[in-house]
Amino acid sequence: MKRIIAIVAGGDSSEHDVSLRSAQGIYSFMNKDLYDCYIITIQGTEWTAQWGESQFSTIDKNDFSFETDHGRIRPDFAYITIHGTPGENGILQGYFDLIHLPYSTCNVLVEALTFNKFSLNQYLKTWGIRVAESLLIRRGQEDSLNVTDIVEKIGLPCFVKPNADGSSFGVTKVKTAEELKPAIQKAMDEGSEVMIESYLEGTEITCGCYKTKKVQRVFPVTEVVSHKEFFDYDAKYNGAVEEITPARISDETTQRVQQLTSAIYDILGCEGIIRIDYILTGENGKEKINLLEINTTPGMTATSFIPQQVKAAGLEMAEVLSDIIENKF
C-alpha cells in the first residue's frame, strides 16, 4: 500500500501564492511509485483538498480527511510547505500533534522560536553565534520612538523588517533617519512586531541541511548576488538575483559554514529540511559568519535554493523527500 501524503500549502501570509508554487514543486518531485499525493490548500478556515484534475473537497478538521469519488481519504503524513502563518510558526504543527498526524517540519517550540527573528537571535547569541545588532518594536510603541536613540544603537544604513513573518514583504533598507518611521509602518502592515537590524556589508550565502535516523546531510553552500539593493521579493521570485552553487568562497569557509549549519540544527533540535541564511564579513578565507535567519519551510520550486543544493550534492529530490517522510515511521 502506498502512503498517502498531504502537501499542505497556502497559509495566511503575503507569501500564500509562493507557497502554492512550492507545493507544485514538491508534488513534481515526489516518488509516485511510493506515495499518493494530494495538495491541501489552507487559507483562514477554508481548508480544501484537490484530487483528480480539477476536483476539490473540504477538509474535515477532526482528522484532516476528505471525501473523493473513491471514498474517504485520510493522509498518513503532512508535508508542510506554508511560508508564514500557520505553517511556519508552530500553529499547524500543534494541530497535527493533536490529531496524531506526522509531519515534515520542526516541532511547535522550534517553529515558534525560528519564526520570531528577534527571539531566535537572542537565544542563539547565548551559544556564541554571531548575529547583527537589533532591537524590537511592538505595535503601539511607534509614537513613542526616539529615532536618535535607534540610530545611535543600530547605525545607518539598517534594515527594518517584520519580526515574525517571511522576509520577502515589508522589508526596507533605511539609509536616513527620516526614512525610519515610514519603514516601521510598512513592516507593521505585515505583523504586530518589527525588528530593526544593523546593516552588515558582505557576501550573502545560504545553506540547507536535514537529518534523519539514518542520514545526516548538509548541502553545498549557495552564494546570493542580488541585483537589487538587498534580497527582497523581486530578487527572490522575479529573477533579480544570481544564485551560485557552490558559492565562490574558500573550502575552509565552506566547511565552517556547513559545520555551523549542522550545529544550529542540533542546538535547536530541528526536524525536516531547514535552510540557514548568513552574511560573511571580513577578510576572504577568514570571514566571520553572521546568522541572518532560519527557514524551516524553505521554498521548493525547481529553481529554489534547496533543489539547487540537492542537485549540486549529486542527490535526487525524490530521495530527499522520501528520507524526510520515512523518518517518521
Image: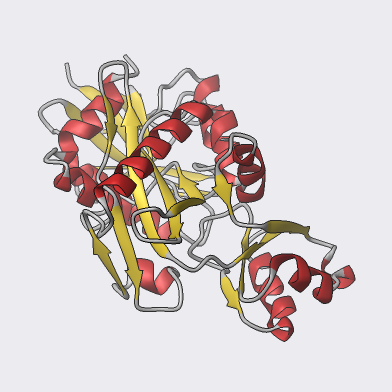
Of residues 312 and 299, which is closer to you in this image? 312
- Residue at (14% x, 38% y) in the render: 315
| 205 displayed left or right of 51 | right
How many numbered marks appear? 0
Q: Position of residue 200 (x, y in %)?
A: 53, 65
Q: Position of residue 47 (x, y in %)?
A: 46, 43
Q: Position of residue 256 (x, y in %)?
A: 36, 41
- Residue at (30% x, 60% y) in the render: 223
Q: Position of residue 263 (x, y in %)?
A: 44, 31
| 184 displayed left or right of 305 | right
- Residue at (62% x, 41% y) in the render: 125
- Residue at (49% x, 42% y) in the render: 87
| 84 displayed left or right of 302 | right
Quadrant in the picture for the C terminus: top left
For residue 82, above or below residue 128: below
Quadrant in the picture for the N terminus: top left
